[in-house]
Amino acid sequence: MQINFKPEFLNNMKALLREGYDDFIASYQKESVCSLRVNALKNADIKNIFQDVKFTPVEWCENAYYYPSSFRAGKTAAHLAGAFYIQEASATFPATALNVNEGDKVLDLCAAPGGKSTHIAALLNGSGLLVSNEIVPSRANVLSQNIERAGVKNAVVLNEDPRNLEERFEGYFDKILVDAPCSGEGMFRKNPEAAEEWTPDSPQICAARQFEILSSAFRMLKEGGILVYSTCTFSPKENEENVDRILKEFPYVELYPIETDIPQPILYDVNADDAVIKGTVRIMPHLTDGEGHFCARFVKKTAQECRVKELKPQKNQAFGKALAKFCKQFLNITPEANLFFGNFGYSAPCGCPDLNRLKVLRAGVQLGELVKDRFEPSHSFAIALKPEEVKNVLELKEGSREATAYLMGETLPCGLEGWTLVTVNGLPLGWGKASGGILKNHLPKGLRINR
């Protein structure tokens, strides 16, 4: 593998690692490992679904596994159904360090593309509230799609600048994750183009932006709340030195050391307190099977009074009537639509905050659309359902001709009538509408695979 390292980057790493530098450089001659995290919300047995694939546990994250590069995980029906998220092994550590408890209100402030948000959602197990925010609109759309694919019901996806959120959610969240934009040094092996885009000024520019974001985040954390700060870079300016600055400038915050069995490098020339270096975690490619990552954890000692208002449930009589009729005919449950955008109705999470004047991409589960007094279920609704909650279910097997045909958008033979949930190995894939022995495919065109 050819990586065009800038001389300044190599000099920085020599100064940081010294005797560990040669092993660090040698690690770039090895291929990146592939890994995924099983979505606990779906409870899928991937070892049974893919019996010919060898899965090896990632030691620091429950439900995360390495897999061989020959396995095209992203091309499977189970992936589309949200059974797992393809996630770099090191990136699974921050959400684990956040100590999420069921019922927590959690903010993922720099959330795209969604790996850490979907991990947090699995730890919440359908309880509490997850607010996932991304400032870049295109990335926020990807985040929303991945939240949908994972079948998350208790998430709100926002497209906001953190500075617009800090006053709105002052002292509100139990846990906050800040996986901040960084210079990306830890991903050079996986993304060699990033090494060419790196400049000597990148770490300092990123460190300043990260400090801004953290300043907003701490304002939104409640007293006793936990914040995890992570990057995928090696630069001490963005890591230990930023942590040291936070502790000196925010007296109401203290470091909450992370205990881990992950081998830690010996570091040199880091302008930070020794307690910061010992209390934070680095994942290094020459010491573990993973790319570069850094993680620090804080606890807030005092907080401002929280005045966040809850969302007032909305009502739409026509939508509610059409939804009830659909549910009586095709479902074994009757969810409530309590939030509306145009003709679309949503089941917003319990305790959802007031979303007025915020750029909202997703609020709970989009149930469907009212079309001429008729309810049309959404793909989001299908993915969030369990097979036992639906009366008509067409079960397919991973890798079967029928499953492939459905993923291509083709019709299928079907002896049922009306709206039908298509599943693969018990995992919802999407809707179909059956009539006269044929199932019309309702998988969104953007999710279909090419022939």
Image (tube, rainbow, N blue to C red):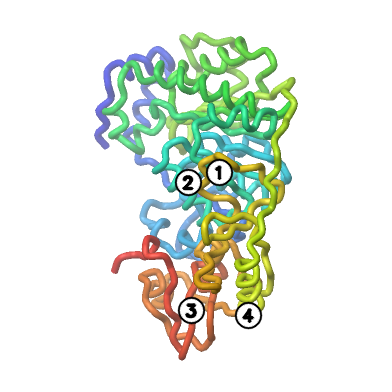
- Sequence-first disc among 1 and 3: 1
Residue 435 at what x, y percent from top left? 47, 86
- Tell me, for residue 143, which label it has, or none: 2
Q: Which residue is mark 4?
A: 329
- Front one among 158 and 89: 158
- Sequence-first disc among 1 and 2: 1
Q: Is residue 209 left or right of residue 70?
A: right
- What amino acid is labelled 3 in the image? Lys
- What amino acid is labelled 2 in the image? Leu
- Foreground mark, 4 or 1, reads 4
Q: Which residue is mark 3?
A: 433
Residue 436 at what x, y percent from top left? 46, 90
- Label 1 crowd bin: few (<14), some (14–19), many (20+), radius 10 Å: many
Residue 204 at what x, y percent from top left? 41, 16
Q: Mark 1: which secondary structure?
A: helix
Q: Mark 3: which secondary structure?
A: strand
